[in-house]
Image: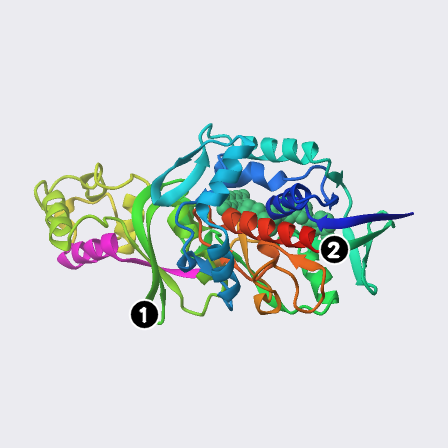
């Protein structure tokens, strides 16, 4: 069976929904092809269900990729205010939290999806779910898309909004890369970013579940490449939590001997921590060493840190702890260095670094420089943002520009 649509958006995620809406608002007839049962599935999982849908300071320094000129131009063309105004018109009142993170006032990520879906219905956008684009060809002035149902769909314009590989349980499978590559585009090797770190340490099971406000620094060849502060979550495989996720990009491109240094007391000076530890271990010599530290450290951490400091029996009287072991312990509390062995997989990652080379995309409307009438949006491109609403912001901005441009040349 052969169908025909003026604009086909491949992928009903954040950027695809926005692109389809904008094109329809500009008067174009649009259809979305979505391989999953419903559009926008991933949005429900964002921001721990609260959907951190933008950031009031989407500065270029929060974005990464081989070439950031496209990102620079896109972020100049669509301001954070414009994104917030569009969502306000759709029905989302927002609130701003720490580091400029924007959430729906209702704290429900589902609200963002609800209002987008409502508007998509109002604009009569045709949604074809459980329909995966498996190949795409450009004929003279139209595209021919083949689906998993063996249908052929003809379109004048195609917006490729297939996302990357991160969050594979929400539909991301990297198939958009193959579609773009089949049309001649170059792929910058994708790798997981905003992802948990796996560590080399025999004691991880013992501290599983501990949450600690600290600072983590990612080290390569003795040099700290990036430092992040916040709640660190210790797990069976390594560490997670907001500051750790920001370092995932570095760990994905891990080098031999990379380490993290954890400062468990980032707001304490060295003298303060020394005084605290010496008082605890020396003022009551009969007290078991491990019990002397209760109230300062999480109980699960105490035996681990004492052993790491060289103490053989952690329950022995504090008086038996040597000066060297005390010094080691103090050092560990400020600079606990642990080897990095990698990251968790695509399923756990929140965003894909790498993607289609942005040097092959026109910055004004996200049109391909190689194939006229083809537009690329969101995570399929080699641009990824830090944790903090920057990735959805990128999805909305690129979707808006591509939808507008695709509709204007019909
Ligand atoms: C758990 C989690 C939490 C996150 N939290 C946040 C957050 O709070 N703030 C933030 O800014 N970012 C967050 N992100 C990142 C953000 O969700 C993505 O960057 C953003 O959704 C990318 O939008 P997109 O439109 O490019 O791709 P996606 O939203 O991934 O959408 C792509 C769509 O295309 C469909 N598709 C793929 N291939 C095909 C094909 N061949 N044919 C048809 N359909 C296809 C997929 O099924 C999917 O629905 C989070 C991601 C995850 C996984």
Q: Say which label, 2 or 1, has the lower sequence index.
A: 2
Q: Residue at x 74, y 39 (%)?
A: 127
The quadrant in which residue 62 appears is bottom left
Q: Nearer the viewer, mark 2 or mark 1?
A: 2
Q: For label 2, count other residues whose C-alpha is less than 10 Å away and answer few (under 14), some (14-19) or many (20+).
A: many
- Seen from the viewer's position, the closer of residues 276 and 120 is 120
How far across and how far down the image is residue 47, in percent? 48, 40
Find the magenta span and give its range: 322-340
Q: Name the residue tied to disc 1.
A: 222
Mainly helix, strand or loop, the magenta region? helix
Q: Which mark is residue 320?
A: none
Name the residue furthest bottom. 221
Q: For label 1, count other residues whose C-alpha is less than 10 Å away and answer few (under 14), some (14-19) or many (20+).
A: few
Specify whether residue 395 is painted magenta. no
Q: Name the residue tied to disc 2.
A: 157
Rounded to the nearest angstrom, the CA distance separating label 2 from label 1 is: 50 Å
Q: Is mark 2 within 8 Å of ligand 1?
A: no
Q: Is residue 333 visible?
A: yes
How far across and how far down the image is residue 407, in percent? 69, 50
How far across and how far down the image is residue 349, in percent? 53, 51
* Position of residue 391 in the picture relative to residue 376 (left or right): left
């Amino acid at each position: 069976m052969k169908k025909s649509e003026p604009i086909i958006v491949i992928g009903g995620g954040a950027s695809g929904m926005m692109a389809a809406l904008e094109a329809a608002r500009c008067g174009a007839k649009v259809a979305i092809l979505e391989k999953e049962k419903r559009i926008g599935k991933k949005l429900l999982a964002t921001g721990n269900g609260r959907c951190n849908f933008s950031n009031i300071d989407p500065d270029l320094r929060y974005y990464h990729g081989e070439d950031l000129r496209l990102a620079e131009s896109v972020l100049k063309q669509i301001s954070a205010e414009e994104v917030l105004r569009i969502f306000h018109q759709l029905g989302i009142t927002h609130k701003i939290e720490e580091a400029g993170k924007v959430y729906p006032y209702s704290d429900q990520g589902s609200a963002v999806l609800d209002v987008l879906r409502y508007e998509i219905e109002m604009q009569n956008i045709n949604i074809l779910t459980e329909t995966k684009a498996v190949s795409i060809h450009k004929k003279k002035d139209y595209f021919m898309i083949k689906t998993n149902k063996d249908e052929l769909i003809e379109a004048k314009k195609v917006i490729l909004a297939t996302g990357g590989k991160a969050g594979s349980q929400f539909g991301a499978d990297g198939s958009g890369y193959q579609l773009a590559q089949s049309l001649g585009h170059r792929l910058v090797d994708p790798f997981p970013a905003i992802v948990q770190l796996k560590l080399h340490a025999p004691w991880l099971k013992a501290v599983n579940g501990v949450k600690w406000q600290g600072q983590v620094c990612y080290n390569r060849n003795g040099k700290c490449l990036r430092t992040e502060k916040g709640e660190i979550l210790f797990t069976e495989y390594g560490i997670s939590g907001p500051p750790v996720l920001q370092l995932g990009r570095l760990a994905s491109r891990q080098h031999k001997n990379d380490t993290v240094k954890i400062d468990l007391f980032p707001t304490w000076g060295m003298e303060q921590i020394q005084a605290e530890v010496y008082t605890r271990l020396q003022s009551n010599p009969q007290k078991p060493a491990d019990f002397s530290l209760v109230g300062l450290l999480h109980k699960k951490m105490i035996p681990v840190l004492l052993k790491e400091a060289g103490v053989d029996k952690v329950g022995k009287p504090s008086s038996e702890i040597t000066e060297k072991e005390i010094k080691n312990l103090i050092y560990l509390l400020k600079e606990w260095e642990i080897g990095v062995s990698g990251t968790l997989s695509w399923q756990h990652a929140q965003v894909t670094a790498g993607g289609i080379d942005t040097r092959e995309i026109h910055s004004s409307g996200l049109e391909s420089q190689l194939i006229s009438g083809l537009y690329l949006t969101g995570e399929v491109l080699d641009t990824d943002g830090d944790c903090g609403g920057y990735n959805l912001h990128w999805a909305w901005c690129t979707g808006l520009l591509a939808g507008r441009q695709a509709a204007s040349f019909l």
